[in-house]
Image: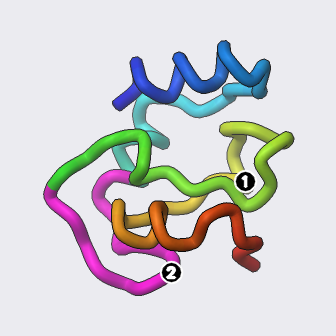
Amino acid sequence: MLKSILKIVKRDNLPFELTSSALRDLRTKKCGICGKTTKKKTYRNVGLHTWKKGYVPGNVFPVCCMCFTTRAGLSIP
């Protein structure tokens, strides 16, 4: 999961300030959109409130793969 996120961070020149424990916590929580849990853990399990702010505390939330795919860049409060 971290490798995939770092690839995106580098490609899009986004900030990354999450610790490994913060990423682990995101993986164990329910989806911030639908409330479901998922067993498959990928970069798609981390949602961003604002894309350009990047992967920083306060800008990330847990998200399941289905919601990640279907929300297609919609703003999530």
**Residue, x 69% and y 46% (percent of image)?**
57
**Residue, x 67% and y 38% (percent of image)?**
55
The residue type indicated by label 2 comes to Ile
In the picture, the disc for residue 59 is: 1
Q: In which quarter of the image is the N terminus?
A: top left
Callout 2 secondary element: loop
Looking at the image, residue 22 sits to the left or right of residue 56; the answer is left
**Residue, x 57% and y 72% (percent of image)?**
71
Q: Where is residue 22 shown, x and y percent of the image?
A: 48, 42
Q: Where is residue 40 shown, x and y percent of the image?
A: 18, 51
Q: Nearer the viewer, mark 1 or mark 2?
A: 2
Way the structure is coloured: rainbow
In the picture as drawn, the residue positioned furthest to the bottom comes out as: 34
User: Mark 1 or mark 2: which comes first in sequence?
Assistant: 2
Q: Closer to the camera, 67 or 61?
A: 67
46 to 9, vertically: above or below: below
Magenta stretch bounds? 27-39
The image quadrant that residue 10 belongs to is top right
Q: How crowded is mark 1: few (under 14 residues within 10 Å), some or many (20 or more)?
A: some
The residue type indicated by label 1 comes to Asn
Q: Where is residue 17 shown, x and y percent of the image?
A: 68, 28
**Residue, x 80% and y 55% (percent of image)?**
50
Callout 1 secondary element: loop
Pointer 2: what residue? 33
